[in-house]
């Protein structure tokens, strides 16, 4: 970039910012903005910089030989446009980091509540509040968090998944709270059916929407290899879409074959591990072969 080259050759010539700024008849802050790519000098000042540093303008602008004859004003306008886009992207990245930090902070607070708060009802309420706030931040910044261009249909899918997560968790926490407060009660068989319904709903819902999830780092199968490569991401989520229905049917068949709640819980955990593990392992093999 132009600013990097100005800084590089200024240092090679042994000038401080104050000395070069004085030769150019500008204040040091202006030169600092040029060197930090916050702005660009006009054509006349650029020629003066070139003369002061004894470096051709084409070198400062990183022009190839075939482009050395371009109009200097047009080239500076192009560089200024690139800088504006670059600074805008930096601002987006900074804002996205702040929002991620807020989500992580709320997640940490929810974990601390689980560990430190003894009252189950208070703990459920505080954890639910943290989760809802985190999902709200995620929902309002889905476009900001997206890795690349996201179509209207893909953004709609992201919003649907985020809203579903919020509603699902709120309902689940509300049921747990009502059970803990003994407002409602469930028999052993009703608890088994509730557990089976929860897992079946999750499997079918995410199986239906996973193939349409765009490549990003916040919603979906977020494994170290899937978030590093878009092709790996797409493969993993297509696999989830394929195995969702048969996995749900096998899970229900296995769960209905036992009557003990503990066994149904074990089957549910195994089904969840397979639901994540099958696309996870296949996508890992694909990722390894692609890059190794």
Image (cartoon, grey):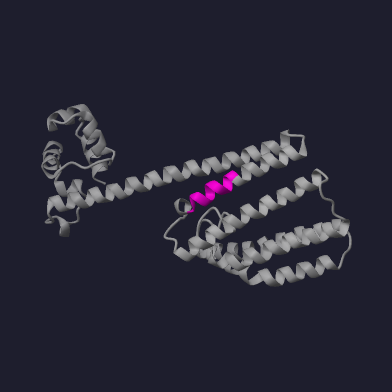
Q: Can the viewer see residue 250?
A: yes
Q: Nearer the viewer, residue 13 or 89?
A: 89
Left or right for 249, reference 285 = right
On screen, 291 above or below 39? below
* Residue 230: percent from left, percent from top: 49, 62
Q: Residue at x 83, y 56 (%)?
A: 191
* Residue 224: percent from left, percent from top: 57, 54
* Residue 57: percent from left, percent from top: 15, 46
Secondary structure mostly taken by the magenta-highlighted segment of the chain: helix
Left or right for 165, reference 21 = right
Could you say which quadrant of the image residue 195 lies in? bottom right
Magenta run includes residue 176: no
* Residue 130: percent from left, percent from top: 62, 42
Q: How many marks?
A: 0
On screen, 60 above or below 17? below
Could you say which quadrant of the image residue 51 lies in? top left
Q: Nearer the viewer, residue 225 or 77?
A: 77
Magenta run includes residue 135: yes
Q: Residue at x 68, y 64 (%)?
A: 203
Q: Can the viewer see residue 291?
A: no
Residue bounds of the magenta highlight: 133-142
On screen, 239 above or below 87? below
Q: Residue furthest front?
A: 183
Left or right for 245, reference 217 = right
Q: Residue at x 45, y 51 (%)?
A: 144
């Amino acid at each position: 970039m132009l600013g990097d080259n100005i800084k590089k050759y200024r240092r090679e010539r042994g000038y401080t910012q104050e000395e070069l700024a004085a030769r150019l008849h500008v204040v040091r802050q202006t030169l600092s903005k040029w060197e930090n790519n916050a702005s660009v000098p006009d054509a006349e000042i650029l020629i003066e910089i070139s003369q002061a540093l004894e470096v051709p303008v084409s070198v400062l602008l990183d022009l190839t030989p075939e482009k050395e004859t371009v109009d200097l004003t047009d080239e500076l306008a192009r560089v200024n446009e690139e800088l504006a886009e670059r600074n805008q992207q930096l601002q987006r990245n900074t804002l996205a980091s702040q929002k991620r930090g807020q989500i992580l902070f709320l997640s940490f607070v929810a974990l601390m509540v689980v560990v430190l708060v003894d009252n189950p009802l208070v703990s459920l309420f505080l954890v639910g509040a943290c989760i809802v706030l985190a999902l709200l931040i995620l929902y309002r910044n889905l476009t900001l968090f997206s890795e690349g261009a996201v179509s209207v249909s893909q953004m709609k899918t992201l919003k649907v998944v985020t809203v579903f997560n919020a509603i699902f968790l709120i309902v689940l926490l509300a049921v747990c709270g009502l059970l803990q407060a003994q407002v409602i009660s469930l028999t052993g068989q009703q608890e088994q059916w509730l557990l089976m319904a929860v897992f079946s709903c999750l499997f079918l819902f995410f199986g239906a929407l996973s193939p349409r999830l765009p490549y990003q780092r916040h919603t979906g199968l977020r494994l170290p290899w899937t978030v590093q490569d878009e092709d790996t991401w797409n493969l993993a989520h297509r696999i989830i879409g394929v195995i969702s229905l048969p996995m749900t049917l096998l899970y229900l068949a296995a769960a209905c074959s036992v009557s003990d709640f503990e066994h149904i819980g074990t089957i549910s955990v195994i089904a969840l591990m397979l639901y994540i593990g099958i696309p996870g392992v296949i996508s890992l093999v694909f990722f390894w072969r692609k890059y190794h």
